[in-house]
Image: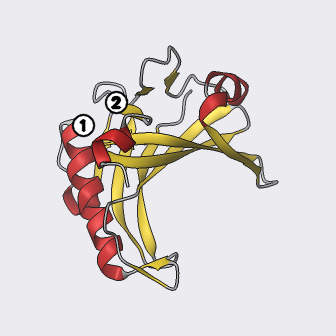
């Protein structure tokens, strides 16, 4: 099995901007930010697309994979309402995370939440107190979702006027 560093070499790093909440994927020219439209995202991130889902309520999700965040393999989902980007959900695949019947254990979920709090907090230069932080551009979170029994992390952008 290849080492983690060799395996991550084929992944595109995610870089978060604490000033405006934008996300740059490697050296790709398009930023993930509130002005990114659904149509632009489909084109800009076509090589990273892992799936697309129209939930039939005006919300549309694009899933991207082969990313890395804080040294761990990662994936994100871009949530659009119409053409407008609303939020970005994030998840990481921590090495050694325990599974039970194919599902993460509570310990694995807790480890991911802790990792995401540290990683998002460092990238955004603000502690996620209670798993949440507000910014002029929106908010970031990393916490346990008891309803879905999973780690929940991401960025929600403030509505544009």
Q: Residue furthest bottom?
A: 101
- CA gap, disc 2 and disc 1: 8 Å
Q: Residue furthest right?
A: 56
Q: What residue lies at 50% left-to-right and 41% top-to-bottom?
A: 66
Q: Is any atom of residue 3 visible in this view?
A: yes
Q: What residue lies at 71% left-to-right and 31% top-to-bottom?
A: 83
In the displayed structure, 88 sits above or below 102; it is above
Residue 50 versus residue 38: which sits nearer the camera?
A: 50
Seen in the image, is 125 located left or right of residue 31?
left
The earlier-in-sequence mark between 2 and 1 is 2
Q: What residue lies at 52% left-to-right and 79% top-to-bottom?
A: 102
Q: What secondary structure is found at the residue carrying circle 2?
A: strand
Q: What residue lies at 66% left-to-right and 26% top-to-bottom?
A: 37
- Please state the horizontal and vertical placement of residue 127, each as a whole percent of the image: 17, 49
- Please state the horizontal and vertical placement of residue 68, each as a whole percent of the image: 38, 41
Badge 2 density bin: few <14, some 14–19, many ≥20, Cα 10 Å: some
Of the 4 image quadrants, the one containing the N terminus is bottom left
Task: Kindly indicate the quadrant of the structure image that contains residue 122.
Answer: top left
Find disc 2 in the rendering and name its residue.
15
Find disc 1 in the rendering and name its residue.
123
Residue 123 versus residue 104: which sits nearer the camera?
A: 104
Residue 52 versus residue 153: which sits nearer the camera?
A: 52
Asked whether disc 2 touches disc 1, contact meaning CB atoms under 8 Å apart, the reply is yes
């Amino acid at each position: 099995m290849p080492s983690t560093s060799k395996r991550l070499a084929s992944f595109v790093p995610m870089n978060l901007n604490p000033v405006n909440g934008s996300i740059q994927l490697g050296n790709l020219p398009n930023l993930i930010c509130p002005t990114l439209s659904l149509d632009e995202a489909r084109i800009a991130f076509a090589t990273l697309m892992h799936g697309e889902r129209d939930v039939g309520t005006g919300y549309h999700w694009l899933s991207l994979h082969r990313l890395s965040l804080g040294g761990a393999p990662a994936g994100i989902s871009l949530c659009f309402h119409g053409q407008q980007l609303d939020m970005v959900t994030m998840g990481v695949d921590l090495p050694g995370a325990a599974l039970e019947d194919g599902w993460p254990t509570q310990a694995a979920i807790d480890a991911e939440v802790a990792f995401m709090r540290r990683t998002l907090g460092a990238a955004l230069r603000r502690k996620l107190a209670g798993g949440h932080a507000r910014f002029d551009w929106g908010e970031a979170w990393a916490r346990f979702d008891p309803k879905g029994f999973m780690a929940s992390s991401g960025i929600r952008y403030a509505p544009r006027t």
